[in-house]
Amino acid sequence: MTPRASSVYLLWGEDDFLLREAAFEVLGDLQPRELDAGTWQGGELADLATPSLFGERRALLVNDCRSLPDEATAELAAYLTSPDPDAPLVLLARVGDRAKAPAVLVKLVQPVGTVREVKVTRKDLGAWVVGRAKIKELNLAPDATPALIQTLGEDPAALEQALDQLASAFSGQRLTRETVAKQFRGLGDQHVWDLCDKAFSRDLPGATRSLQTLMHGRDDALMILGGIASRLRDLLRVRAFPDRLPPAELAKRAGLRFDWQARRYREQARRFSMEELIDIHTGIAEADRALKSGATDDVVLPVLVARIAGEPARV
């Protein structure tokens, strides 16, 4: 796909994976320079417009643009008065549940480029899975798609990974609910990952809804607590490494399987001070003791989730 003439895009939405997929659809065959907004040093946009020694077109992809420092926003404003039409600039902004695009960036980009929300609604998720399966030449039976979503949850990145696994394990075969159950037996804890994503993104309403779904499904309270503890350990490991570390290297050093996990966990870790993360660790230990002493999960877990997902002043 050839980037359009304006070549300036602000893509925003709730899901990192979908945002990156949309970004690379925009960029086509171009290989961008990529950076996280929090590591902005200055001069990145001047470099974007500088011709390559070998004549290749330049492109810049900026992740987590809600974390752009003030000086970067000022530099961006100056650049967008006359952006280079041959050097694509793609800004990604992940927002919380039901939040809007960053108003400052919308105001800057809209006059000269494209502002687009990237999302897959719950009612469209099944069709999205079917579409991704067709791209991978997977033959999904009608009952396989809901089985995937029920087993793995609604995280597009996890569903994409699951389709890749199925394509590798069952090439050329028709895939049914039974196939999904066989391949992903024991992976129902994906629902806990969704809870952790929302809680550690400070999305209290979304985290509360996710927890209620788990509890209505009679998931074991200690299993849920174990998932929260595991995510906290990941965030503490990610927090220990410098922001300038590329996502692939961060994933390797922190023991994560995928680059997108490193990006997501870095963004989540930035929402908490080290003191807050230690306080959450204390809260998890207290919740564990309470549950093992006979306290009910419908009291203990909501209190813990509120402790994590509430605004910093409430932690």
Image (spheres, rainbow, N blue to C red):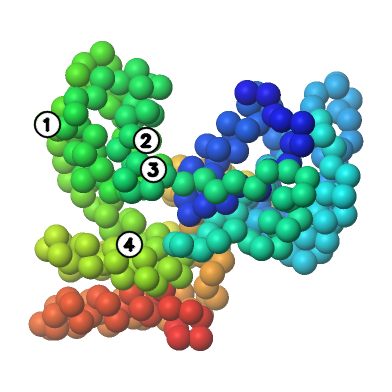
How far apart are the two marked residues, 1 and 3, measured between alpha carbons?
Answer: 21 Å
Name the N-terminal-most of marks 2 and 4.
2
Q: Indicate the amino acid at tag 4.
A: Leu
The quarter in which the N terminus is drawn is: top right
Q: Dot 2 surroundings within 10 Å: few (below 14), some, or many (20 or more)?
A: some
Question: Of the numbered discs in the image, which one, if any, rests on residue 96?
Answer: none
Name the N-terminal-most of marks 3 and 2.
2
Quarter of image, res 34? top right
Q: Is residue 311 above or below residue 261?
A: below
Question: Of the numbered discs in the image, which one, if any, rests on residue 128?
Answer: 2
Q: Indicate the amino acid at tag 2.
A: Trp
Q: Dot 1 surroundings within 10 Å: few (below 14), some, or many (20 or more)?
A: few
Name the N-terminal-most of marks 1 and 2.
2
How far apart are the two marked residues, 2 and 4, measured between alpha carbons?
Answer: 22 Å
Direction bottom: furthest residue: 313
How far apart are the two marked residues, 3 and 4, measured between alpha carbons?
Answer: 15 Å
Q: Indicate the amino acid at tag 3.
A: Pro
How far apart are the two marked residues, 3 and 2, measured between alpha carbons?
Answer: 9 Å
The residue identified by callout 4 is 195
The residue identified by callout 3 is 156
For this rendering, which residue is in front, 216 or 288?
Answer: 216
Q: Indicate the amino acid at tag 1.
A: Glu
Q: Mark yes or no: residue 93 visible.
A: yes
The answer to the question of whether label 3 and label 2 lie on touching residues, with beta carbons closer than 8 A, is yes
Label 3: element kind: helix
Question: Can you give x and y, in whole percent of width and height, for residue 82 in the image?
Answer: 88, 44
Label 1: element kind: helix
The residue identified by callout 1 is 178
The answer to the question of whether label 3 and label 4 lie on touching residues, with beta carbons closer than 8 A, is no
